[in-house]
């Protein structure tokens, strides 16, 4: 749902750095795996209760998540294997970050946070799975209210500015991801019906 103008502006800002990566012969897959490692580190930092630091590191990880796709487009190295690796990396990244939240809530005994994280993981997984399954039957399903860029931005804002209310923020995160999964499910089902009818 992020405005295309914002995305394009962000790409222009990153362009000189992407050109530097191209000059250094760094591959898109290398950036993907680097982003994954930083996201895993983010999950660990969140688990230890250093939420503000986690937010800062998550910003760095998110930048690397953007670098790989932009570098692939710039160098003409877009490929099915690269897209597959990027998608799998995104799923692992989100799981480790949400897992970090879950562990943190367990250590402080926050039941709202624990249950909210559990449902947030379900919502996040199902949001991604509905799209993947739809593509498996030949249906393009990119829409949805709370896609990955919005989820990452939401978590960054939560960690940086609302860490004291992170359990309530996670509750809202769970609601929004589950809503998006259901939204995609309905859209996909209707598309399949329209093709068959």
Image (spheres, rainbow, N blue to C red):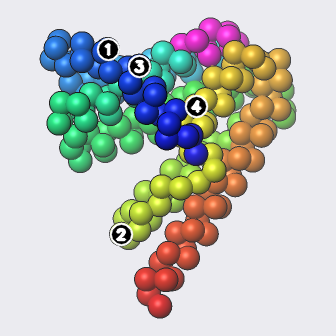
Closer mark to the observer between disc 2 and disc 3: 3
What's the magenta region?
A: 49-57
Label disc, if present, on residue 13 of the rendered structure: 3
The image shows residue 124 at horizontal and vertical percentages of 59, 45
User: Helix, strand, or loop for circle 3?
Assistant: helix
Q: Earlier in the sequence, mark 3 or mark 4?
A: 3
User: Helix, strand, or loop for circle 2?
Assistant: loop
Q: CA distance from mark 3 to mark 1?
A: 8 Å
The image shows residue 132 at horizontal and vertical percentages of 43, 57
The residue where tag 1 is placed is 17
User: How many numbered callouts?
Assistant: 4
Does residue 17 appear left or right of residue 81 in this picture? right
Does residue 161 appear left or right of residue 133 in this picture? right
The image shows residue 187 at horizontal and vertical percentages of 57, 68
Q: Earlier in the sequence, mark 1 or mark 2?
A: 1
The residue where tag 4 is placed is 152
The residue where tag 2 is placed is 138
Q: CA distance from mark 1 to mark 2?
A: 36 Å
Examine the rendering and report whether any part of residue 47 can be seen. no
Q: CA distance from mark 3 to mark 4?
A: 19 Å
Q: Earlier in the sequence, mark 2 or mark 3?
A: 3
Badge 3: how crowded within 10 Å, few (<14), some, or many (20+)?
few
Label disc, if present, on residue 118 of the rendered structure: none
User: Helix, strand, or loop for circle 4?
Assistant: helix
Examine the rendering and report whether any part of residue 9 can be seen. yes
Does residue 113 appear left or right of residue 70 in this picture? right
Q: CA distance from mark 1 to mark 4?
A: 22 Å
User: Helix, strand, or loop for circle 1?
Assistant: helix
At 47% from the left and 34% from the top, the residue drawn is: 7
At 65% from the left and 61% from the top, the residue drawn is: 182
């Amino acid at each position: 749902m992020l405005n295309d103008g914002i995305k394009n502006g962000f790409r222009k800002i990153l362009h000189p750095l992407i050109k530097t990566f191209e000059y250094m012969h760094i591959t898109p897959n290398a950036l993907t795996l680097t982003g994954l490692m930083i996201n895993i580190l983010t999950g660990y930092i969140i688990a230890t209760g250093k939420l503000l630091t986690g937010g800062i590191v998550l910003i760095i990880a998110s930048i690397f998540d953007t670098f790989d796709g932009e570098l692939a487009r710039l160098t003409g190295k877009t490929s099915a294997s690269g897209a597959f690796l990027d998608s799998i990396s995104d799923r692992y990244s989100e799981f480790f970050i949400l897992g970090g939240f879950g562990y943190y809530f367990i250590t402080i005994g926050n039941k709202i946070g624990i249950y909210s994280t559990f449902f947030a993981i379900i919502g996040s997984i199902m949001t991604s799975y509905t799209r993947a399954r739809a593509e498996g039957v030949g249906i393009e399903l990119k829409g949805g209210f709370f896609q990955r860029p919005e989820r990452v931005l939401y978590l960054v804002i939560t960690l940086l500015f609302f860490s004291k209310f992170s359990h309530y923020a996670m509750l809202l995160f769970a609601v929004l991801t589950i809503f998006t999964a259901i939204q995609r499910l309905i859209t996909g089902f209707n598309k399949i019906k329209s093709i068959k009818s």
